[in-house]
Image (cartoon, rainbow, N blue to C red):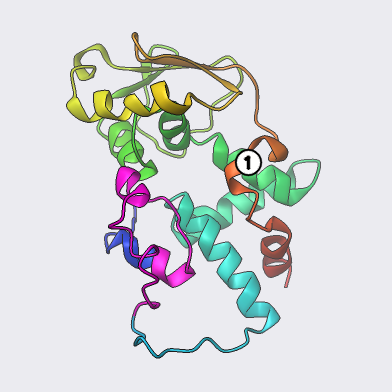
Amino acid sequence: MARYLGPQCRLCRAENTKLFLKGERCHSAKCPINKKASPPGKGPRYRTKKMSDYGIQLREKQKLKRIFGMMEKQFKLAFVEADRLSGKTGDNLITLLERRLDNIVYRMRFASSRKMARQLVSHGHILVNGKRVTISSFIVKENDVVTVQTKSQKMLGIKESLKEYTKSGAKPWLEVNPDEMKGRIIAIPRRNDVTDLEDINVQLIVELYSR
């Protein structure tokens, strides 16, 4: 499966906002956004020009796509599925992305970033309803149980990531048992439940793909 292998911080600089791609580093003084770094390939005297409507829509799509660590083909397939479902396409898109297994592993605090969560899934460390699932884009359902494999529960990275659960807990649609490294999807998230993505204008993405 294709994936982005370049510098993660470069993506944040391109969007001029924190996408929280590197876990704890994004909250530290080392984050280039804190230093007001210029966009990649641009000098410190670079001045942004007024964007066209297309440019604004494109940037919004790139931002959401990069937050979830997806390539263009994957993201487009998710949009097509969201458009097929009943209801608002933009809201459906957010819900589908939130239900991806790699995102659920990240939201349950078993991983400090979605990139780490994808690695845990693809390397076979995650079980869904007792069965190993190695597909990051696997869509979970209500009442599905996500567990870290017993032999993987000793991994230092997972233990360190779970410290965040003691600080801020998990999303309200998730039930997590940090001691057993197990969680359950107690409800399907709605658009207004995903408060950390409120700045994403999904309508612009819908308009982009409707061109």
- The image shows residue 179, relative to residue 104, as above or below, that is above
Q: What is the x, y in percent for residue 28?
A: 32, 50
Residue most toward the right?
Answer: 87
Q: Which residues are the magenta region?
A: 12-40
- Name the dominant secondary structure of the magenta segment: loop
The residue depicted at 64 percent of the width and 39 percent of the height is 95
- In the image, 62 versus 135, the foreground residue is 62
Q: Quadrant of the C terminus?
A: bottom right
Quarter holding residue 37: bottom left
Q: What is the x, y in percent for residue 193?
A: 67, 34
Residue 151 shown left or right of residue 74 in the figure: left
Quarter holding residue 45: bottom left
Q: What is the x, y in percent for residue 130?
A: 39, 11
Residue 133 shown left or right of residue 90 in the figure: left
The residue depicted at 40 percent of the width and 38 percent of the height is 136
- The image shows residue 27, relative to residue 110, as above or below, that is below
Q: What is the x, y in percent for residue 94?
A: 63, 45
> Residue at label 1?
195
The residue depicted at 61 percent of the width and 16 percent of the height is 186
Q: Is residue 28 magenta?
A: yes
Residue most toward the top?
Answer: 180
Does dot 1 land on a helix, a strand or a loop? Answer: helix
Residue 116 shown left or right of residue 182 in the figure: left
**Which kind of residue does numbered mark 1 sit on?**
Thr
The residue depicted at 70 percent of the width and 34 percent of the height is 190
